[in-house]
């Protein structure tokens, strides 16, 4: 069983049925026994953040305007997805910049860390908001509703209205 601290927020009453369904599915997945959860409220709205590692001693906080250096894996969320990093047969991400995973998929994608300034529009909304408040060295799972991800139109390998899960490793915060 994966141990983690969970930070969550709801869809903030926006009334969008897709968001509410996706948000409820995330809550069920996260609190249904896959994680040990202490659920402090955080106003992320449509983004659930799961801290996968011990943050003790880390103090470089990613705030709006900070530059982050990240590796990530992007997945389409479904209720039976198993993202435990200790199992061998994990689902294939729709995109990653982690070399070992990209090589294993037989794809020729860039595998350099992404460097982005938070709050600048360089990242899509859910990823940007999910990283704010995180620390250098954090390993996160970000569960992102479609409205906070790629929306109604999707993007390349991501279908329309797809809820997302990003596993993010924060290498540096400047």
Image (cartoon, rainbow, N blue to C red):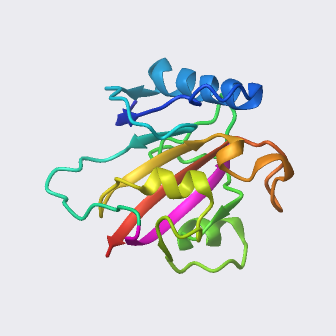
User: Image quadrant for the N terminus?
Assistant: top left
Percent from the top left, x then y, of residue 98? 54, 69
Q: Is residue 121 left or right of residue 151?
A: left
Outermost residue on the left side: it is 57
User: Is residue 3 at all visible to an observer of this figure?
Assistant: no
Front in this rendered view, residue 77 or 153: 153
Nearer to us in this view, 167 or 27: 27
Q: How many marks?
A: 0
Up/down of 40 relative to 156, above or below: above
Residue at left offset 31%, top offset 26%: 38
Rendering coords of residue 134 (x, y %): 34, 54
Residue at 75% in and 25% down: 17
Residue 149 lies in the magenta-colored region: no
Instruction: Tell me, yes or no, whether the highlighted magenta stretch contains residue 71.
Output: yes
User: Which of 103/150 is in front?
Assistant: 150
Quadrant for the C terminus, please: bottom left
Nearer to me, 58 or 64: 64
Where does residue 128 sit, x and y in percent of width and height? 52, 58
Q: Is residue 16 above or below residue 139?
A: above
Q: Is residue 35 above or below residue 95?
A: above
Q: For residue 13, what is the image quadrant? A: top right
Instruction: Give the residue displayed 83% in from the left and 49% down from the top.
Output: 159
Q: Is residue 13 visible?
A: yes
| Residue pictured at 53% horizontal, 37% vertical | 45
Q: Which residues are magenta?
A: 65-76
What secondary structure do most residues of the magenta stretch adopt?
strand
> Residue 10's spot in the image, x, y percent?
54, 28
Q: Going by the image, does 19 lie left or right of 64? A: right
């Amino acid at each position: 069983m994966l141990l983690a601290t969970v930070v969550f927020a709801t869809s903030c009453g926006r009334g969008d049925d897709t968001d509410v369904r996706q948000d409820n599915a995330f809550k069920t997945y996260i609190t249904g026994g896959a994680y040990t959860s202490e659920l402090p409220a955080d106003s992320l709205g449509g983004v659930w953040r799961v801290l996968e590692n011990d943050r003790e001693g880390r103090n470089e906080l990613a705030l709006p305007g900070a530059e982050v250096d990240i590796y990530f894996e992007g997945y389409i969320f479904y209720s039976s997805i198993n993202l435990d990093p200790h199992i061998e047969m994990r689902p294939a991400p729709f995109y990653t910049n982690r070399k070992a995973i990209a090589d294993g998929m037989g794809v020729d994608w860039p595998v350099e860390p992404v460097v982005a300034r938070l709050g600048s529009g360089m990242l899509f909304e859910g990823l940007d908001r999910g990283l704010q408040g995180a620390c250098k060295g954090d390993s996160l799972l970000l569960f992102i509703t479609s409205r906070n991800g790629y929306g109604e139109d999707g993007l390349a390998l991501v279908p329309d209205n797809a809820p997302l899960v990003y596993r993010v490793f924060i290498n540096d915060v400047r």
